[in-house]
Structure formats: structure tokens, C-alpha cells
Amino acid sequence: MCRNIRPLNNFEPPATRDEVTAAALQYVRKVSGTTKPSQANQAVFDQAVREIAHLTQHLLDDLVTTAPPKDREVEAAKAKARAELRYAR
């Protein structure tokens, strides 16, 4: 999985449209192998991002879990602590 794509399920508040679109963009960039498509491929690239964001939102809306929602701030603090340990070397 691309490191820039973050889990979006089971957060309170739920993932925003911008977060879903950012994840879709990262996915399309990874699969296409480019961060900036040529002019000839821009329309196809943008369409893929829109479609994947749409499907991702449906997935997030339909997933069911019994786990309590995660707190974004707590999860961000955990990630920061892990990064500090990883990059302190």
C-alpha cells in the first residue's frame, strides 16, 4: 500500500470528501506511475480519481464494524510517536 494513503474507516468524525479524494489521487498516482500526467492523459487521470473517490466513499459508507470509532487526534499522536522512534536513528 502507498504510504501516503491513510486508513479512513471508523473515525469520528467520518472521513471528509477531501480525505477520500486525496486517497484516490494517491492511488491513481501509484498505479499510473506518475504524479503529474501528460496533457494527453490528464482527462483520463482526473476521471479515474473521481471514480475511485466515488467508490471509496461507497465502501466507507457500507462498511460495518463493532469497534468504537477512533479519535483522529489520538491516532495522529500515535503516528507521530512511531515516526519519532523510526527517524531518531
Image (spheres, rainbow, N blue to C red):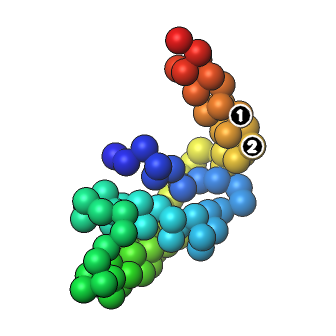
Type of the residue with mark 2: Glu
| Residue 83 x %, y % | 58, 27
Residue nearer the viewer, 17 or 86? 86
Locate residue 13 relative to residue 41 in the image: left or right: right
| Residue 25 x %, y % | 42, 67
Residue at image point 62% right, 22% down: 84
Residue at image point 36% right, 69% down: 36
Q: How many marks?
A: 2
| Residue 10 x %, y % | 59, 53
Element type at mark 1: helix
**Residue 73, disc:** 2
Mark 2 and mark 1 in contact? Answer it, CB < 8 Å: yes
Residue at image point 54% right, 55% down: 9
| Residue 2 x %, y % | 37, 48
Q: Quadrant of residue 85?
A: top right
Q: Quadrant of residue 30?
A: bottom left
Residue nearer the viewer, 37 or 79? 37
Crowd rating for badge 2 (residues with CA inside 10 Å; few <14, some 14–19, many 20+):
few
Find disc 1 in the rendering and name its residue: 77
Residue 62 makes an appearance in the image: no
Residue at image point 55% right, 21% down: 87
Whole-number angstrom distance, CA of label 2 to CA of label 1: 6 Å
* Residue furthest to the right: 73
Q: Is residue 2 above or below residue 54?
A: above
Type of the residue with mark 1: Ala
* Residue furthest to the front: 39
Locate residue 23 relative to residue 70 in the image: left or right: left
Crowd rating for badge 1 (residues with CA inside 10 Å; few <14, some 14–19, many 20+):
few
Q: Is residue 62 above or below residue 75?
A: below
Residue 13 makes an appearance in the image: yes
